[in-house]
Amino acid sequence: MAAAASVPVRVCHQEIVKFDLEIKAAVQDIRDCPGPLSALTELNAAVKEKFHHLRGRIQELEQMAKEQDKESEKQALLREVENHKKQMLSNQAAWRKANLACKIAIDNSEKDQLLQGRDSLRQRKTTKESLAESASNITESLMGLSRMMSQQVQQSEETVQTLGLLSCEIFCKNTVCICFTHQSV
């Protein structure tokens, strides 16, 4: 963290770490979820909310970094922001993998129940309904993940543009300083 960081910066950083740990715990809960699909859906809703809060705190930290007077503190905070964004992307990938593993486990469990043959007519009707619900939920989850990935790509593009503008600005400032030095000689 930046040297002698202000209290709001430290609080924001602590909240980012807290949300990161909560997301990791929730992803582990998803990995361990035995089903049914409705329980997985509830866990996913909680993870989405935590990602929303985490993203907000990272953006808040980025704004604080841009408002820093000292260039060294600004750059240190911007590096922290980039590290937090990378960690968030890693958590999103882990979340997608955990979801996939859980859905496969639930499907396999349902297949095993089907093969046991107990109350086959009743079980088929229930299974068809749950499969239809599962297909609908999976489609909804995939659409949500697609939207989330689209937002992340947009945020990454904005970050790249910001970094490009900052480096151009620094280059221009350095060039102006050199020009003034050569003119005065």
Image: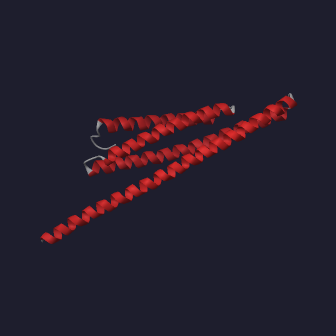
Quadrant housing the N terminus: top left
The reply, left or right, for residue 48 in relation to residue 179 is: right
Provide residue 161's location: percent of width, then percent of height: 41, 57
- State how many labels appear: 0
Residue drawn at point x = 59 percent, y = 33 percent: 43
Quadrant housing the C terminus: bottom left
Residue drawn at point x = 51 percent, y = 52 percent: 153
Residue 32 visible in rendering: no
Q: Nearer the viewer, residue 80 or 147?
A: 147
Residue drawn at point x = 50 percent, y = 36 percent: 50
Using the rendered view, name the quadrant where residue 181 is placed. Answer: bottom left
Residue 63 visible in rendering: yes
The reply, left or right, for residue 1 in relation to residue 156 is: left
Q: Nearer the viewer, residue 67 or 116?
A: 67
Vertical position of residue 130 compared to residue 84: above or below:
above
Provide residue 152's location: percent of width, then percent of height: 50, 49
